[in-house]
Structures are given as structure tokens and as C-alpha cells.
Image (cartoon, grey):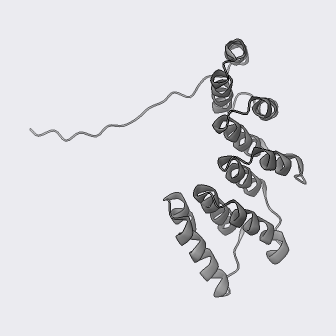
Amino acid sequence: MIDGYGKSGEPDKALELFHQMQLRGVEPNYVTFLAAISACGHGGLVAKGHEIFESMERDYSLKPRMEHYACMVDLLGRAGSLHQAWDLVRGMPERPNSDVWAALLNSCNLHDSVEMASVAANELFKLNAKRRPGAYVSFSNTLAAAGKWDNVSQLREAMKIRGVLKDTGSSWVGAEIEA
């Protein structure tokens, strides 16, 4: 329910439910924390998200997992706090995985940070060059927004050489037909 409220634009309800759960003695688990941090990200509640993230280990002895770090990077990135997101990634106790780098790359794309996007994209490409075609597209969009068309061409060429194919888009349209 916390996740549902957060994703449907009701972060305050999500966090109230999270708080009520704790008041009733129900300890949050990894999934609950992820939903609460995500709700903060969707609501732009940076301080609250950071507080919840910090409370995982401090209050519940739950060491944040990669998905929690990725969610925090997304939260900070959505809010435009790219340098805080960068510091979080660089200070991680373990090597960041592709989800963390993808969250940083997407944040850089939102805020036109080409230099940081370049680092995130290169780390992401090293981890899994073919399995994340969206990373190439996101980085290409960041480069294009900055007017770096030569770099866009080079990246598209690298995609061809590496055999990376863009995901094909599809959609369903329903229609009622009277006979």
C-alpha cells in the first residue's frame, strides 16, 4: 500500500502509513523501506527520504541494499541534487551496480549534466554493454540536448559495433466495434 500511494502521487499518505506501521510495532523490512524512500522521491521529499534511508541501519540494523541506493540516487536526482547523488554513489560501501548507475544517468539526463552523465554511462556500459540499450539512448539524449552531435554520432556508431539494439516501442489501442 505504501508503494501504491507513493506511485500514485500520494506520498503523504504513503509516509503516514509507514509511520502508523512503526507506531503499531510493525518493523519495516527491506521492501517497506524501498517503498517509503520511493514515495519520498515521487513527492520531492528529499530530507524525509534521507532520514528514512539513514534510519534503516541506525534503527533497524538493516544494511541498505543496491536498490535502496539506486532509489536514493533517483530521489536526489529528481530534486536536482546531482552532487549529493554523486557523493552517495562514490561513498557506497560496495561497488555500485547497474541500477545505481542508471539512476544517476537518468538524473543527469533530467538536468543536462553531460560530464557526470558521461561517467555514469561509461560505468554502466562496462557493467552490461548490451543489456541496457536504454542507457545508450538516455546518454545520447543528454548529449543531443547539449548540442554535442558528433558525440551522439559516435555513440550511435558504438551501439552498432557492440550489437546494441534499441528497444522496440509498442502500444495497445482498444476499440469497441459495433456489429
As rendered, which of 122 and 48 lies closer to the eye? 48
In the rendered image, residue 53, in percent from the top left (x then y), is placed at: 76, 65
Q: Residue at x 28, y 40 (%)?
A: 174
Query: Is residue 98 shown left or right of residue 110?
Result: right
Q: Please, which residue is most extreme toward the left here?
A: 179
Image coordinates for residue 83, horizontal then vertical, percent = 80, 45
Q: Is residue 35 above or below residue 166?
A: below
Residue 99 picture quarter: top right
Tell how many labels.
0
Q: Indicate the position of residue 115 as horizontal and vertical percent values.
A: 79, 30
Place residue 56 in its image quadrant: bottom right
Against 137, residue 25 (above or below) is below
The structure residue drawn at horizontal position 63% and vertical position 63%, both measured from the top left corner, is 35
Considering the image in quadrants, where does the C terminus appear?
Answer: top left
Query: In the image, 133: left or right of 176?
Result: right
Q: Nearer the viewer, residue 177 or 58?
A: 58
Q: Quadrant of residue 21?
A: bottom right
Which residue ends up furthest to the bottom in the rendered image? 24
Residue at 73% x, 33% y is: 113
Residue 116 is left or right of residue 40, and the answer is right
